[in-house]
Amino acid sequence: MQGALTGIDYVVLLLYLASTLALGLAIGRRVRSQQDYFLAGRRLPWWAIGMSLVATDIGGTDIIGVGGAAYSYGMAVGNFEWIGCVPAMIVAAFVFVPFFWRTGIYTIPE
């Protein structure tokens, strides 16, 4: 097996890109304001927001880096998630989020 792409690979890639573009354009037409874009118009259920936060928190460092560090140094490295991240999320939920709501900002860089 060679590393070059074949015709079917290019077809699948182009279909994926075209469908992603079409979906983005279709959904993008529904956005009417900044609040719609950043907060989905405040219409998402709590579980969807929670899953989004978890997905945002888990990245390449968690999957590759923490796994490699746990292999090298032991499972104690995995405690970083519980000792570091969970308390930080709780502090953010009770300290920073109310401040964000009062000031009307949508994102941290604002």
Image (tube, rainbow, N blue to C red):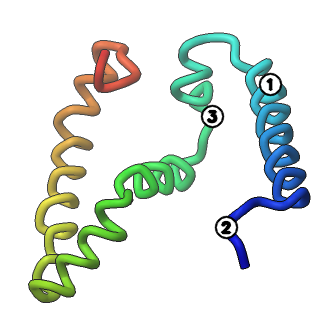
Any mark on residue 3, and which? 2
- Position in image of residue 35 (x %, y %): 55, 18
Which percent across, then down, holds residue 50?
A: 46, 53
Q: Which one is closest to the eye, mark 3 or mark 2? A: 2
Q: Which residue is mark 1?
A: 25
First in sequence: mark 2 vs mark 1 = 2
The amino acid beneath tag 1 is Leu
* Residue 4 locus on image (x, y percent): 72, 62
Helix, strand or loop at disc 2?
Answer: loop
* Mark 3 or mark 2: whose residue is earlier in sequence: 2
Callout 3 crowding tier (Cα within 10 Å): few <14, some 14–19, many ≥20: few
Is residue 35 shown left or right of residue 4?
left
Q: Is residue 23 left or right of residue 60?
A: right
Relative horizontal placement of residue 12, taking residue 60 as reference (left or right):
right
Residue hosting label 3: 43
Depicted 102 relative to depicted 57: above or below: above
> In the rendered view of the protein, which quadrant contains the N terminus?
bottom right
* Residue 75 falls in image quadrant: bottom left
110 is higher (above) or lower (below) than 85:
above
Between the C-alphas of marks 2 and 1, the distance is 33 Å
Callout 2: few (<14), some (14-19), or many (20+) C-alpha neighbours within 10 Å? few
Q: Amino acid at mark 2?
A: Gly
